[in-house]
Image: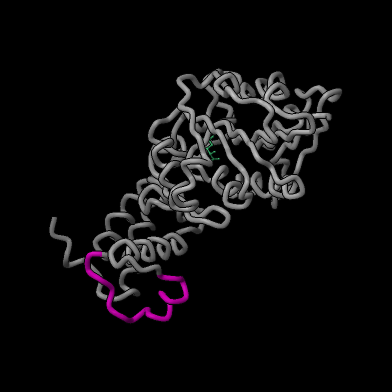
């Protein structure tokens, strides 16, 4: 492919090139994302080729300076693939989540801001308890477990995951954030079946269980790019019942927790009430927490002591 005639020579040219390709996507234009994503692509391409991080302000300060030709080629490829719907994070290979940057790729769900809220809610509750042993159902990129491990130095987490590709990525993330001790602090159980929720965990008496389970319903409005590119098992329960995981937690989680232990679940806001009604109020104290958009997003259940 000889595209060199199209390749820009400055940061400004690189941005213009990215914008030109991204503008071919109706979704990006309608959502007013062309400029933001063009900037992200230019920054990520520069970083990949030079191994140097480039902040947004640096990029703007250097707008007329030369842009490395290899990075310009990346901008061209990424912007055209992004315009076809491929998530930006799968192209650049990164997503920032709370305090760290995580590797992501096909096979793992891209961690979302809603899930940052799940983790901050858990941190708020756990900070006075200094947890030692936690369970995560559905590790994905590892962002949830690793953020908690980074914050609570005595904590160990055992996590389940069905997708082997996700396990590989999560272990790399754990090593990048936690260093060599990640091997001792995060244990992963490869689960063969998406319907086995807590049965895979041999050790009980956890201080907490946390999960962002697959919770979409086939009748929910879903971004077609998400459906096309992100792992199905991370989005939908294997059963046609989209509340499958919540029913499992409501029936069995108490057996895996210490008295007074916590269950933190991300929930679909439309079904949050329905989900909280699945829990027996005689054994659980239940609270729904609202995210920044004011929607019910996290269910906190405390097992009565
Ligand atoms: N725990 C991962 C996350 O929240 C994966 C969740 C999932 O695959 N549903 O990002």
Quarter of the image with the C terminus in it: top right
- Residue beneath the point at 64% across and 24% down: 243
Q: Nearer the viewer, residue 176 or 46?
A: 176
Residue 100 position (above or below residue 300): below
Instruction: Give the x, y percent position of residue 77.
Output: 27, 55
Q: Say whether residue 182 is visible.
A: yes
Residue 252 position (above or below residue 34): above
- Residue beneath the point at 67% across and 50% down: 120
Instruction: Give the x, y percent position of residue 268.
Output: 65, 35
Residue, far right: 282
Q: Nearer the viewer, residue 46 or 136?
A: 136
Left or right placement of residue 106 versus residue 76 in this view: right
Left or right placement of residue 156 versus residue 269 in this view: left
Quarter of the image with the N terminus in it: bottom left
Magenta span includes 265:
no
Instruction: Give the x, y percent position of residue 245.
Output: 62, 24
Left or right placement of residue 28 versus residue 265 in this view: left
In the image, which residues are magenta? 54-70
Residue 252, quarter of the rendered image = top right
What is the number of callouts on the image? 0
């Amino acid at each position: 492919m000889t595209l060199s005639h199209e390749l820009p020579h400055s940061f400004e040219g690189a941005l213009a090139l990215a914008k030109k390709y991204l503008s071919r996507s109706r979704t990006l234009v309608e959502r007013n994302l062309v400029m933001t994503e063009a900037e992200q692509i230019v920054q990520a391409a520069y970083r990949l080729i030079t191994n140097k991080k480039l902040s947004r302000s640096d990029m703007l300060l250097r707008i007329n300076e030369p842009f490395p030709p290899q990075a310009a080629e990346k901008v061209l490829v990424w912007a055209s693939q992004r315009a076809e719907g491929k998530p930006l994070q799968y192209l650049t290979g990164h997503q920032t989540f709370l305090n760290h940057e995580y590797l992501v790729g096909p096979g793992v769900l891209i961690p979302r801001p809603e899930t940052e809220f799940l983790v901050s809610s858990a941190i708020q509750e756990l900070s006075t308890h200094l947890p030692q042993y936690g369970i995560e159902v559905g590790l994905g990129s590892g962002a949830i477990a690793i953020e908690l491990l980074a914050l609570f130095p005595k904590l160990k987490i055992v996590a389940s995951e069905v997708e082997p590709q996700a396990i590989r990525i999560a272990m790399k993330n754990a090593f990048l954030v936690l260093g060599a001790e990640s091997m001792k602090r995060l244990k992963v159980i490869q689960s063969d079946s998406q319907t086995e929720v807590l049965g895979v965990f041999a050790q009980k008496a956890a201080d907490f269980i946390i999960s962002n389970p697959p919770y979409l319903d086939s009748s929910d409005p879903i971004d077609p790019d998400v459906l096309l590119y992100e792992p199905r098992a991370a989005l939908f329960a294997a059963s046609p019942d989209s509340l499958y995981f919540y029913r499992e937690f409501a029936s069995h989680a108490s057996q895996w927790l210490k008295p007074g232990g916590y269950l933190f679940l991300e929930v679909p806001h439309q079904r949050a009430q329905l989900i909280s009604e699945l829990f027996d109020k005689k054994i659980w104290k239940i609270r729904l927490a609202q995210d920044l958009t004011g929607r019910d997003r996290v269910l906190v259940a405390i097992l009565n002591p």
